[in-house]
Image (spheres, rainbow, N blue to C red):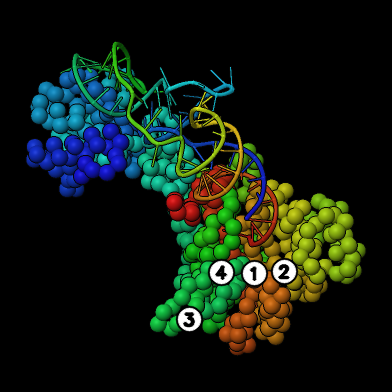
Amino acid sequence: MLTGHHSDQELNRRKKIIAFRQQGLEPYGEKYAVTHYSRDIIEDPDSFMGKNVSLAGRIMTKRGHGKAAFAHIQDSKGQIQIYLREDQLGEKNYTFYNELDVGDIIGVTGEVFATKKGEITVNVSSFSLLSKSLRPLPEKWHGLKDIELRYRQRYLDLMVNPEVRNVFVARSKIIQEMRSYLTERGFLEVETPVMHTLAGGANARPFITHHNALDIDLYLRIATELHLKRLVVGGMDKVFELGRIFRNEGISTNHNPEFTSVEIYQANADYEDMMILLEEMTASIAREVLGTTKIEYQGKHLDLAPPWPRRKLQDIVLEMTGVDFDTIEDDDAARKIARERNLEMKPNLSRGEILFAFFEEFCEDRLDGPVFIKDYPVEVSPLARRCSSDPRFTDRFEAFIAGKEIANAFTELTDPLDQRERFELQVSRRALGDDEAHMMDEDFVTALEYGMPPTGGLGIGVDRLVMILTNSPSIRDVILFPTMRPKE
RNA sequence: GGGCCAUUAGCUCAGUCGGCAGAGCACCUGACUUUUAAUCAGGGUGUCCCAGGUUCGAAUCCUGGAUGGCUCACCA
């Protein structure tokens, strides 16, 4: 136990385990009969004054004063001070306490009182060691700042940086509110396969895995869309799935290889209904979790209260770049203007794709929002229904808050013949080397051939919504264990 | 994948022109019965990210590598 490469502090703690056991003191104790959390007492001291309580927590600070001592212990809801005296505990127990280290988890029982300075404190009459900590904690004053250590050893981050816990508590509440908002309105939560025989529903590179018994490659899902729409065909007219999606793409402050999405489908609805659903649900979640729809994100003040503005993508491009795509008749004219604006392009892009590229390149991150950008070119929307008024566009929107795309939605394409053609166009792109283009999903087309009711569909990037609502600058701040390269 | 930056004690960080490896907290020894980043006296505990190179001498300069951050590309 004392071999290997340990610091002096680790060696000291390991030696204590041996010493404790020699004295019959077990360093990894049984559960302690806890009656309260620290916060229960701190928030309502009058009800507890003079009463006995039992708490369990991690020692975060120790202050010894000879024959008396103070410490703070931390449980899942906060910290509380404890006070220990040799004349109350007896010499043996008091010596045992003095041998404990910051980081150890103990259970304490005692009477609540207030110190001279007024701090609510537990006057400990008995305690036991529940778990001996063998490693020193990060510094009490500066906390754990090293971003790499915070992500790799999130438990340390949670221990010493209390605001981190708050973010993940908020995340949990946001998801809980989303789920109850939807189920209360008659949406059925379902689970569809995570392993797909072909990856569809989005333009992204998938992760590939292998099933040994079937001897086939499987893809981790890049979207839940195509299975959920099969369910709508089957008569489940209001469904949603909240779950993990995997995309084999780069990592950035806005992208993690695995992330959480919710996709929502409602039959006999269209994308305008999805706008109302999204803005109402987002505002409702903000009110429940934050108590207000007015938020601050990285210095920007935004109000999530509906209604959010609805703007056509082409109008935004005109407004922000001065380029009027109404006057651009064909692909050649579009490519010409793209070259003039130094827009880097894959070869042979069409007018619609260039319009979309203009939006992404020059407009997207300038949208403070919340705002709906609607009517996307059909070429970049292979699963969305064409606008009745102009078949070059689709009834699709994306929602932006603080320059981040947080949702993508459309009136679903229900025409199986059109869907097959769109897939075929994607397949030809794939053949030309675009490995993010869709694969042909014959079974999905077959499902559409049986008839799918007019349907509105909405996908939300849950992590990004959590970022917005918790004022977190990086997606890694809202994912407990973000993807990291293994060390060494 | 490209560019820029970072990596020194358990943690947070200094380290000048290339000349014995530093501080605060933590830790160790001692004092102290209501402290508050407790205080007082004493103690430095290290693979300076790794591997080479230059040099009498490298934490410091050079080359290569590792990990991370930001950013660009890509994507949501």
Q: Tell me which chain the residue with mark 3 is part of.
A: A
> Foreground: A453 or A301?
A301
Instruction: State how far apart marks 1 and 2 are (Cα).
Output: 12 Å
User: Which mark is on residue A216?
Assistant: 3
* Nearer the camera: disc 1 or disc 2: 1
Tag 1 and tag 2 share a subunit: yes
Q: Which residue is mark 2?
A: A380
Q: Tell me which chain the residue with mark 1 is part of.
A: A
Circle 1: element type? loop
Query: Which amino acid does the dot numbered 2 rest on?
Result: Val
Q: Give the mark, 1 or 2, whose residue is nearer the N terminus.
A: 2
Circle 2: element type? helix
* Cβ atoms under marks 1 and 4 closer than 8 Å: no
Query: Which amino acid does the dot numbered 1 rest on?
Result: Glu
Tag 2 and tag 3 share a subunit: yes
The image shows residue A337 at horizontal and vertical percentages of: 88, 60
Instruction: State how far apart marks 1 and 4 are (Cα).
Output: 8 Å
Tag 3 and tag 1 share a subunit: yes
Instruction: State how far apart marks 4 and 3 are (Cα).
Output: 15 Å
Q: Which residue is mark 1?
A: A436
Tag 4 and tag 2 share a subunit: yes
Q: Give the mark, 1 or 4, whose residue is nearer the N terminus.
A: 4
Q: Give the mark, 4 or 2, whose residue is nearer the N terminus.
A: 4
> Foreground: A171 or A454?
A171
* Cβ atoms under marks 2 and 3 closer than 8 Å: no
Q: Is residue A280 left or right of residue A65?
A: right
Which class describes the residues within 10 Å of circle 1: few (<14), some (14-19), or many (20+)? some
